[in-house]
Image (cartoon, rainbow, N blue to C red):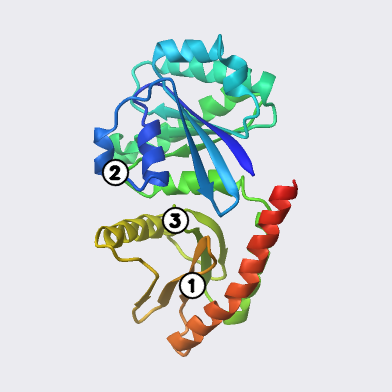
Amino acid sequence: MKKKVLLMGKSGSGKTSMRSIIFANYIARDTRRLGATIDVEHSHVRFLGNLVLNLWDCGGQEAFMENYFASQRDNIFRNVEVLIYVFDVESRELDKDMHYYQSCLEAILQNSPEAKIFCLVHKMDLVQEDQRDLIFREREEDLKRLSLPLECTCFRTSIWDETLYRAWSSIVYMLIPNVKELEQSLNQFANIIDADEVLLFERATFLVISHCQRRFHRDVHRFEKVSNIIKQFKLSCSKLASQFLSMEVRNTNFAAFIDVFTSNTYVMVIMSDPGIPSAATLINIRNARKHFEKLERASQSSALSG
């Protein structure tokens, strides 16, 4: 099942860098060597086995932008499932940015009125820390107002921290078929084994695709931090021609297990009961695999028939 995703924004806003980190295993510092995108770069990203993201990375130079809205309008904006528009938070041409964004929305309304709209206020690491919340809130209000009658969801992002994973996990979550059924099963699994939390990561990107939380945790960014750390660790392993399969981290307060789960996912289980031995949790993970693999196959076949 193919889903067309448009990645748009002015030249230099950081579109190709974020795409390369999420889908092409770049690390943030290596994105400096990426050149500007010329016209439209197409890539097909396989996600969760049968879901294929047909990603259109659209160059943001003025001549290309004008062309998208004139001669290429139908080709670019037809059958779009998701529009991701990236704004450089430090852009000196905000009015022009907003003009192009509104032109995108007009074209979407005409050609793909059901598309989901996401705005990423990017390069937030360049903003003074105590100003970030205020600047993002103001930008979010402007964008939501400008987007009407369409709805947009806004995220603050940076390639240097976990916010990039948070945004892309939320975007991809919207595209996964049968995701509610998956979450229901994850909840049942967490209750049966008495886990604090259970998370499912997509195998290639390590984006969080589903989670269940049974005990409060104060760090709302913890999933994305884990995604970031494990993906870097996986890359280090691959450079040494080794494969990352599983990991256990334990201290006096909790034990965390990360393990290969289905053919397309990893699972992370957090346990705070010191009385439950590691071996029991690992057996429970192994026993749950068959059920989740069956669920994954059902999701794939319903995606194909749909």
| Distance from Cα at disc 1 to Cα at disc 2 | 28 Å
Residue 59 x, y percent position in the rendering: 42, 22
Q: Earlier in the sequence, mark 1 or mark 3?
A: 3
Indicate the amino acid at tag 3.
Phe
Element under label 2? helix
Residue 55, how many percent across, how many down?
51, 35
- Give the CA distance from mark 1 to mark 3: 15 Å
Does residue 178 appear in this view? no
Which element carries disc 3, helix, strand or loop? Answer: loop
Instruction: Estimate the x, y position of residue 12 in percent, counting from the top left.
Output: 34, 25
Residue 225 to residue 270: above or below: above
**Quarter of the image where the N terminus is located:** top right
Q: Which residue, given by chain and number where applicable, does mark 3 sit on?
A: 206
> Picture quarter containing residue 221?
bottom left
* Labels 1 and 2 touching (C-beta < 8 A): no
Q: Is residue 139 visible?
A: yes
Pointer 1: what residue? 269
> Which sits in the foreground, 294 or 106?
294
Q: Secondary structure at mark 1?
A: strand
CA neighbours of label 2 inside 10 A, class few (<14), some (14 to 19), many (20+): some
The relative height of residue 234 versus residue 14 in the rendered view (above or below) is below
- Residue behind mark 2: 28
Instruction: Write down the quadrant of residue 107 in the picture.
Output: top right
